[in-house]
Amino acid sequence: MTVQTVSTNRSFDGVQGVYRHTSRATGTDMVFSVFVPPHAEGTKLPVVWYLSGLTCTHANVTEKGEFRRLCADLGLIFVAPDTSPRGEGVADDAAEAYDFGLGAGFYVDAVEAPFAAHYRMWSYVTEELPKLIADNFPADPTRQSIMGHSMGGHGALTIGLTHPDRFRAVSAFSPIVAPSQVPWGEKALGGYLGNDRAAWRKHDAVALIEDGARYPELLVDQGDADPFLAEQLKPHLLAQACDKAGITLLLRLQPGYDHSYFFISTFMGDHLRWHAERLGQPKR
């Protein structure tokens, strides 16, 4: 699969790159970013996947996530995909709402027209892009982990719970833990997957756990000043589901923090160390 380099920059003796390729899953060009830390030639490195939230592209965390210094120290490749297909002919919400359509793929494979034609983000981030990363970067596919923010936290949790043998660590910042029970999720899952709420359950972390999905331990950070906390995020529902299922959940409610990258960048180091330890990387 041909990968076009959009840009590369040296950072902490590694390389921060932005790349474009034509996706079979979405039928569009897709852009993603990869940070490769300094490493010996021929060395394969573990991969941390970061899934972004509503309205975001790869650029938000790439420019504001403050992950590179620690990824360089810990020897972690950091991959940030886009959040939806884009381009001419890609359907969008007619009302131009930020929470559906472009920038809001919700990491599902849509089945409802007109979104089914291109909105296949589940297949893209779980199948196509991992193969592309393994084929084109010094990545060790046997050592992967996943994290995300908000809509991307939803994606990280659901993908991790669905593929527990693939990902050695799963964490999230301010995740949408139960999209079937909140306005953002009801709009997105209904619009992409249709009105059969039973079909939504495999894209709902709380429902997945209720239905038997298991993962050894999860890390979630949530700001208590997040304006979306009560209506859209509801981390207590994840805590209840994990407690009932016997899943270890480290849920940290961070006082005074909101939903922004000021919050994410503050605790990014904690998450990367959590991932590195479970990926077998030396402590720093």
Image (cartoon, rainbow, N blue to C red):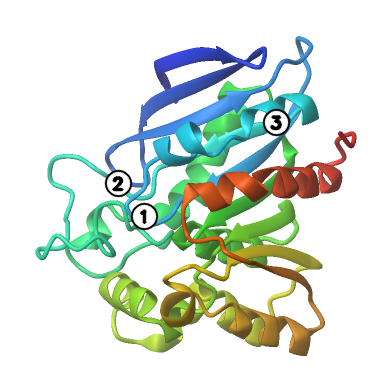
Does 170 appear above or below 32?
below
Residue 206 place in picture, x, y as percent: 59, 81
Q: What element carries label 2?
A: loop
Q: Which of marks 2 and 3 is nearer the N terminus?
A: 3
Of discs 1 and 3, which sits in the foreground?
Answer: 3
Please tell me the numbered disc located at residue 85: 2
Identity, as a three-letter code, of the amino acid under mark 1: Arg
Left-right relation of 115 to 272: left
Residue topped by disc 1: 120
Quarter the C terminus occupies = top right
Q: Residues within 10 Å of mark 1 (few under 14, many from 20)?
A: many
- On the question of residue 267 being in view, the answer is yes
Please tell me the numbered disc located at residue 243: none
Q: How crowded is mark 2: few (under 14 residues within 10 Å), some or many (20 or more)?
A: many
Left-right relation of 167 to 231: right
- On the question of residue 211 being in view, the answer is no
Residue 243 place in picture, x, y as percent: 77, 85
Residue topped by disc 3: 71
Identity, as a three-letter code, of the amino acid under mark 3: Cys
Does 134 appear above or below 224?
above
Q: What element carries label 1?
A: loop
For the point 49% across and 72% down, which residue is it? Answer: 203
For the point 68% across and 37% down, which residue is it? Answer: 47
Quarter the N terminus occupies = top left
Does 262 appear above or below 195?
above
Of discs 2 and 1, which sits in the foreground?
Answer: 2
Residue 237 place in picture, x, y as percent: 60, 85
Q: Distance between the residues labelled 2 and 1?
A: 8 Å
User: Would you say the residues marked 2 and 1 are in contact, meaning their CB atoms lie under 8 Å apart?
Assistant: yes
